[in-house]
Image (tube, coloured by chain):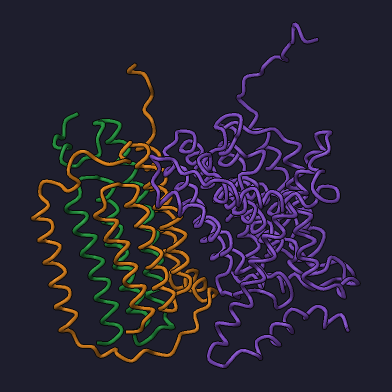
Chain colours: A purple, B orange, C green
Amino acid sequence: MTPETIDRIFIIWKHWLLSYAPAGVQPLFSALLSVVPVLAVFPLLFAITTVLERKGLGRIQNRYGPNRVGPYGFFQPIADGVKSLTKEDVVPRTADQVVHFLAPLLLVAAAFLAYAVLPVGRNMVVANLNAGVLFFFAVGSLVELAVFMAGWSSRNKYSLLGAMRAIAQMISYEVPLVLASVVVIMAAGSLSTVTIVNMQASYTGIWPHWFVFTPWGFVGFVLFMIAATAEANRSPFDLPEGESEIVAGYYIEYSGFKFALFFLGEYLGMFATSGMAITLFLGGWAAPFSFLTWVPSYFWFFAKLLVLIAGFIWVRGTLPRLRMDQLMNFAWKFMLPMTLLNIFVAGAWHFMAAGSVRWLVCAVLIFAPSVLLALGLEKGKKKIAARTYRFAE
Amino acid sequence: MTIPFLILAALTIAGIAAAMYLRNLVHCILALTLGFAGLAALYLQLDAQFVGFTQILVYVGAVAILAVFAIMMTRSAGPMAQPVFSSSWIKGGCVAGAVFAVLAWAIDRSATSLEMLPPQPEVAVRQIGDALMRRFVLPLEIMGLLLTAALIGAVLIAMQEKPEMQ
Amino acid sequence: MSSLTSYLLLSSLLFSIGLAGALTRRSAILVLIGIELMLNAANLNFIAFWRYGPDPAALTGTMFAIFSISVAAAEAAVGLGIILAVYRHSKTTDLDQMNSMKG
């Protein structure tokens, strides 16, 4: 088999399967064949990620992590799944039954919808929408609603507090998330994810044309990933579910399989925003070097996804949780001005002649203000003297 | 009239009617998002992809969440003891019914010269952007000004006054 | 019944429901939402007329709808801000109880 055949193998399989369907139901069958792999692959990735995360965090915290089920504990997700499926599904008596039931379903449905526009390989996208990036962010806003439904319907002050924290945080960080991706839309001149990836899938020498290798692209990528961490409610932005403050936030009153659905939805959201970051900045399914283009395109997408997930796990094991005011100050006083400035720099880049001068000017334009803004965040804070521990020395 | 249109229309009407007449305010907002989503789907039916997605982003993602915040901060969630309709609800209902009757009569009587569905227009997002930047650039700038003013105004109005009274 | 007529009827029904809500509900928040619904009905009209109109390539209806959505967003922000300010002052969002202009 040639590399091209391996690259197209899923498309070939789909056409082969489609040829068995009667002509009347072919559109339906085709849609089904595109959707079912997404519904299968990403939850599997979720299962793998949970065990990788627990083992990775364990290593960071100088312990083993799960190691009982299967070789090196790698069958832990199966045990977790069996456990959550067989547990009793407790619903508080005062809860709003219908809303309480619908919230996890809406969360998972919204998370899955976002995958419709992610190109996971060459010609492998469920729906090539003309306004794909807009669709992605529109669907992402449904998650906030699901979180509110969960927190409010539980009739629990901790869950309501967690939901309000989560919504405030997600709204504040959605603005920089969208604005950080605007630079790519400007450069590509399109809202279609397929077009954006195709623009990055060419090479000068052996180096790819990914947007991350420009000053505005790099800054945009970093800002996008910070905002994505906040959107996914992951450490260091995990205030909505800070277990030491408000127990578990908005899903405190969920148990059994509904709890597992929340967990799934959260990870699916993280994968989807990471996939969007890959699509926008890291060249989507494109190979990192021109001599590696023989490797199938979907392999590159998932390899990049795993690298980003590893980054998420690393950050979670490293950074402490922020305070609410720090979180909001960071969103509105650092992220927002930086994304706006980044859009300006991307415009300047577009109108300057290619060369090293353009590189230098744009890099200075974007990095100098970022340092100044970061210093400005620290200004006006009361200097706290180093704490002395009288008895613990 | 096609079957998708009927389903979407029924969904939208049901959501919006529930939003206006349920007792619990949070239920109202949730039903409202259903109605907004139905409207967005109707826009997609009419080949207005961009407007449909914008509708979801703005109404479900922003307006509904804003309303939820307002409900939470004014403590008006939960079942209310008083009646939900105002004292002048008969007059209001009559006005609304009359408005609908007049509108429906006008639509029914008006010339239906535009019966044929024109061929599907090729609306790329690019064309919308071009139109915004060329033909509609002045409205766009005014809109930016308006949004900025509204943002600052909303913050100023809703800002907590200085606690000097206490 | 042509398809355009059905869209227009739907939007007039939406408008009337929004109007009825705005005129009959006690809660200030829902009155604001009723006004939003009326704007939405107008948007549906714009899109329907654009789609069935003689020149869909001109994009006039789409533009109108986009601007109208932005205005509605600004309106919602300011309106809910006003409701918050009123609530802080008079401790209610019930329109029947807000019957005095003096504090």
Q: Is residue A203 left or right of residue C11?
A: right
Q: Kindly indicate the quadrant of the structure image that contains residue A155.
A: top left
Front in this rendered view, residue B60 or A373 = B60
Front in this rendered view, residue A172 or A371 = A172
Q: Is residue B149 left or right of residue A26?
A: left
User: What's the residue at 53%, 91% (across, down)?
Assistant: A24
User: What's the residue at 78%, 49% (across, down)?
Assistant: A52
In the rendering, at what x and y percent does residue A276 appear? 66, 61
In the rendering, at what x and y percent does residue C28 appear? 25, 45
Front in this rendered view, residue C49 or A48 = A48
As drawn, the residue found furthest toward the top would be A390
Q: Is residue B114 above or below residue A354?
A: below
| Count of numbered tags | 0
User: What's the residue at 24%, 60% (across, down)?
Assistant: C18
User: Can see residue A6?
Assistant: yes
Q: Kindly indicate the quadrant of the structure image that contains residue B163.
A: top left
Q: Is residue C29 left or right of residue B102?
A: right
Q: Is residue A117 above or below residue C77?
A: below
In the rendering, at what x and y percent does residue B87 appear? 11, 46
Q: Kindly indicate the quadrant of the structure image that contains residue A113.
A: bottom right
| Position of the N terminus of chain C by quadrant | bottom left
User: What's the residue at 24%, 40% (across, down)?
Assistant: B80
Front in this rendered view, residue A152 or B157 = A152
| Position of the C terminus of chain C by quadrant | top left
In the rendering, at what x and y percent does residue B45 appear? 42, 78
User: Can see residue A358?
Assistant: no
